[in-house]
Image: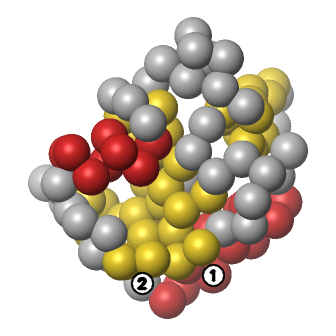
Amino acid sequence: MIAIIKKPNTPAETSEVGNDYETSKRLVGGYIECVTLDNGVCMVCNEEGKIYKLPPNLYLRKNKVGMDVVVGSVFFCSDTPDGEFASLTTAQQEYVHKFIKENSV
């Protein structure tokens, strides 16, 4: 699937990655957690990133009220109605690049 990978302190890169659990774990360096963004985009991050004190990567605004920091490597993909990961469309890729630009640490 086509995904965008964002590691701390490095530019985002668009890449073709495997669409399976083991690949997802490898990309984020541990157990995965999915955060639903707008436009059908899913940000996949390390569920235990803060426990392991991984480096900060992106800010995550919550309803314009509070803010959180996403740590460690993340990747962005689309999801299907039944909850499966899928390739990003061109419009979703543009959305993700804008999201990263606006929310980089």
Residue 92 drawn at (x, y percent):
51, 77
Q: Is residue 31 left or right of residue 93?
A: left
Q: In the image, is residue 42 above or below residue 91?
A: above
Residue at left offset 38%, top offset 30%: 30
Front-most of residues 1 and 99: 1
Marker disc for residue 62: none
Q: Is residue 20 left or right of residue 6?
A: left
Q: Quadrant of the N terminus?
A: bottom left
Tell me the element at label 2.
Answer: loop
Q: In the image, is residue 1 above or below residue 55?
A: below
Residue at left offset 80%, top offset 25%: 66
Residue at left offset 48%, top offset 60%: 76
Task: Looking at this view, name the residue that lies furthest to the left.
Answer: 82
Label 1 crowding class (10 Å Cα cut-off): few <14, some 14-19, many 20+?
few
Tell me the element at label 1.
Answer: helix
Q: Amino acid at mark 1?
A: Glu
**Quarter of the figure with residue 64:** top right
Q: Give the residue at mark 1.
A: 94
Q: In the image, is residue 13 above or below residue 68?
A: below
Q: Give the residue at mark 2.
A: 89
Q: Amino acid at mark 2?
A: Thr
Distance (Cα) linking label 1 and label 2: 9 Å
Label 2 crowding class (10 Å Cα cut-off): few <14, some 14-19, many 20+?
some
**Residue 71 in view (yes/no):** yes
